[in-house]
Amino acid sequence: MTVLFGQLFTGVSIGAVLLLIALGLALTFGQMGVINMAHGEFIMAGAYTTYVLQQVITAAGWSLLIALPVAFVVAGAMGVLLETLLIRRLYARPLDTLLVTWGVSLILQQLARDIFGSPNVQTRAPDLLTGNIGLPGGITVANNRLFILALAGGAVVALTVALRFSPLGRRIRAVVQNRDLAAVSGIATARVDRTTFFVGSGLAGIAGVALTLLGPIGPTMGTNLIIDAFLVVVVGGIGQLRGTVIVAFALGVLQATGEYLTTLSVAKVMVFIAIVAFLQWRPQGLFTLRTRSLA
Amino acid sequence: MTSIRGRRILAGALTLVAVAAMAACGSKTTDGNTAAGVSADISGDTVKVGLLNSLSGTMAISEVTVRDSIMLAIEEINAAGGVLGKKIEPVGEDGASDWPTFAEKAEKLIREDRVAAVFGCWTSASRKAVKPVFEKNKALLFYPVQYEGLEQSPYIFYTGATTNQQIVPGLDYLKAQGATSLYLVGSDYVFPRTANKIIKAYAEANGMKVLGEDYAPLGSTEFGTITNKVKSSGADAVFNTLNGDSNVAFFKEYKSAGLTAASMPVVSVSIAEEEVKSIGTQYLEGQLTAWNYYQTTPGATNEKFVAAYKAKFGADKPTSDPMEAAYVSVHLWKAMVEKAGAFDVEKVRGAADGITFEAPEGLVTVDGATQHIAKTARVGKVGADGLITEVWNSGQPITPDPFLKSYPWAGGLS
């Protein structure tokens, strides 16, 4: 029972990490159709932001809290820069975008190596987040996992509200559903693209802050995560946040269950097989956006 | 992306191994002369040695420190007049964390630079890749890292620990502490799997229970499930053979699950001072490691070594076991050459047995039969300052036994 609950919680928290990473991609890849291979390096930028802030503000709790908005802006700004300088010029050429952003990701990794050195750096987690909460029956819930779950939940709510109710959200949805019609209706699609990219990349930065609580902080930390995040968005269905959320948690629980019953490597294979089978059945993903657009 | 790259590397490695194997067979069936004709170039007033370490790629973090300490040893020897009156001239090559590259560079060092010996390699995969190259060319490699044992090449000197000088003493220590059950966690490749085979045989013979055994793919950073399994197993201790980034994620998870060094200690065999720095003492304090050397190992020789290293490479740079073993390997080679009175590989090998050196870790002795060295085993505890202090040692150097022939329980292993 204890183990069962522990595994369920592990699965949900793997899902929360996946979700946090995939949310940004759901915007840039899901809504705009841009395959940004450098997304993982924005996560890295967020993690290093936490590290740098901690050199200045030594109180671990405060530096982590302050790192959240700062990492959002830092990663977001990097995203805007990438969009303005490169991706904008390649909107109709997805394959070129993929190659160019992969190149950018390699450059950013090397940049991190040159600035911070190739060994991992470490941040101090606030004491509150290294402990756990004990529940009746010997069940424990790790605080850092709870924090990430809350962070992912908060990000989903904020993003959903923003997309549904704010004027900017309406413009983003309009551009996603029918770019040409949005443009002739007077929406500055280029500016909307830039904003979407800012928010999507910024979310990667927040994911980076969260990951400092779980894993290593190094130049290549983003590359391990980016494939899983792309899978979540593809399986969830392009252009839909709902699908991303459901699939992130489903894959997390599937992964944790598989890991428990078999081994980590076999669990990974199981997840991949499940995804391939699912995409055979529903190539468009879990949810699809119905539009009147011809494209 | 990663998987495609991985597959390519694998394909490359397989091709190269195949080619190397064919080349090795070829030279055996025709005649030995073509391959064995290379000897060290000692015509000038210097003698060249090869330095083969990864200066780029994923292993660079660790291997650069080994390169540094080899350079330190060479500098010391040159300052004291060199070897047989000749100054050592180092020829550095970058193995780039890529096993076929290691084999290629080894071939280049031996055949083009005509070095007298090569110092380097870290992972077992890189050692296995260069082994046929050294055997074919009858050239010498000094390998400075602890490894999984069960190997003995006539052209390799192993100056790191084999299993009976690190893993077995680590287990002895746990047993003495009263541990009766273990949980094994490791990365999914040759070293942890072989090590765990040995640990299981040991446990069976010593009345210890192995309650579980889990492997994570190299680079894996999600340890929720493993930690959960470890915790619910209620084992007395965890034996950790994880490598690289996985350690960071594992220890963070371990701490937030409420597991501590007091409730369930972890003994690690791949975490030295450098790794402690990158994982964070917050997560490691009180946990155990098994090695042969720590920066804090007492003795004037070590004080001198640490001071010299810090003076040359920076006060914040810790010294660690593999670095020390690499430093020692250069001095051992010098002693062998001087005893042999020649740089000739066969003469050096012949002179190796019984060579001693007052190393930072204490007295080490070369065992000519296995070409490993007798070393003292040490179990250490990570302190709040990030350094490791010894809590137990074997009292005297342990004779190397790479195939564990002197341990009855290890009969079925090799």
Image: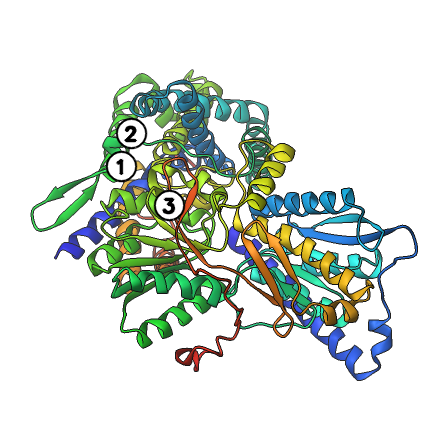
Residue A178, position as x, y percentages in the image: 41, 30
Disc 3 designates what residue? B249
- Badge 1: chain ID: A
Q: Amino acid at mark 1?
A: Thr
Q: Return the residue nearer the eye: A81 or A278.
A: A81
Q: Nearer the viewer, residue B298 or A102?
A: B298
Q: Residue at x 19, y 51 (%)?
A: A6
Cα–Cα span, label 3 and label 1: 13 Å
Give the numbered dot on residue A130. 1
Q: Work out whether B182 lies above or below A149.
A: below
Asked if marks 1 and 2 fall on the same chain, the answer is yes
Quadrant of residue B18 in the image?
bottom right
Query: What residue sits 39% from the left and 79% below the top?
Result: B409
Left or right? Give the position of B20 relative to A103: right
Q: Which residue is mark 2?
A: A126
Q: Amino acid at mark 2?
A: Pro
CB atoms of marks 1 and 2 within 8 Å = yes
Q: Give the chain letter at badge 3.
A: B
Q: Work out whether B190 lies above or below A17.
A: below
Q: Is residue B228 left or right of residue A29?
A: left
- What crowding class fits label 2: few (fewer than 14 Cα within 10 Å), some (14-19), or many (20 or more)? some
Question: What's the residue type where badge 3 is placed?
Answer: Ala
Q: Same chain for the residues at labels 3 and 1, yes or no?
A: no
Element at badge 3? helix
Residue B395 appearing in the image: yes
